[in-house]
Image (spheres, helix red, strand yellow):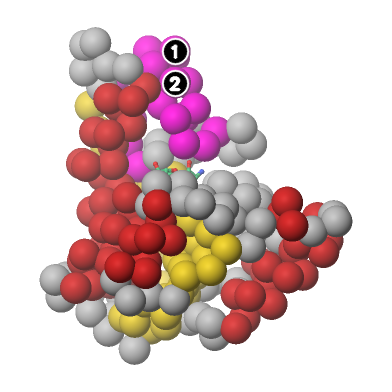
Amino acid sequence: MLRVLVLVSGGGTNLQAIIDAVAAGKVTNTSLVGVISNNKTVKSLERARNAGIPAVSVSPKDFPDRDAFNKAFLEKVDEFAPDLIVLAGFLVAIPAAMVQKYSGRIINIHPSLIPSFCGVGYYGLKVHEKALERGVKVTGATVHFVTEGMDEGPIIAQKAVCIEEGDTPEILQRRVMEQAEWLLLPQAIDDIANGRVTVVDGKAVRTR
Ligand code: GAR
């Protein structure tokens, strides 16, 4: 069983998609061992607890500086002894020490087709605002391994989503979630849990 720890910052619809996919048997060989949020009040913690998954918060606001937070954060992650860490709308930079310790064992969902609309400053609704501002006709979502460069790790899976006349950032965000994110992220976990993803020469390859 792959021990999966999910990190969240917001509403947790991706977390819910993972919980539901595990419960429905669409994601196998996986145990959701915990949820960590950087925000004490988010709906995500409730979603986790409703599913019987231990959920805790660790906020940078509770520490005197970033180093102290990073240390406590890594200790909290270690307590869950995860095989895989899933960033499901986690908007805090992952400390370098954590990326190194869990190298090849952290994945992230990003709401665009990387390398478009990604990197510093591109998160959540802002990604969709930028896509609409640029006037692109197709966007989507990407699941990738996390490396030290932001949104630069090997791409596991992507799915395109069309932009439609009259889209607002909110409408587009919802469509990208429904048509791409909520499918891609559980699928990637299932693929990893069942040994179907390997990284060769810096690129993720799906086998079988
Ligand atoms: C999702 O759209 C996710 O792709 C995005 O935050 C949202 C979280 O929604 N993540 C990023 O922008 C990471 N750079 P959720 O809390 O409802 O899952």
Determine whether 154 is above or below 177 in the image.
below
Q: Nearer the viewer, residue 128 or 73?
A: 73
How many numbered markers are drawn?
2
> Quadrant holding ligand 1?
top left
The reply to whether the magenta stretch includes residue 116 is no
Say few, some or many: other residues with alpha carbon within 10 Å of mark 2 (under 14 / 14 to 19 / 20 or more). some
Q: Describe the element under mark 1 as helix, strand or loop.
A: helix
Q: Nearer the viewer, residue 126 or 50?
A: 50
The answer to whether residue 199 is visible is: no
Q: Image point 34% across, 89% down: which residue?
A: 1
Residue 77, percent from left and from top: 60, 75
Q: Which residues are magenta?
A: 122-141
Mark 1 CB within 8 Å of ligand 1: no
The residue wearing badge 2 is 129
Is residue 105 among what the camera can see? yes
Q: Which residue is mark 1?
A: 133
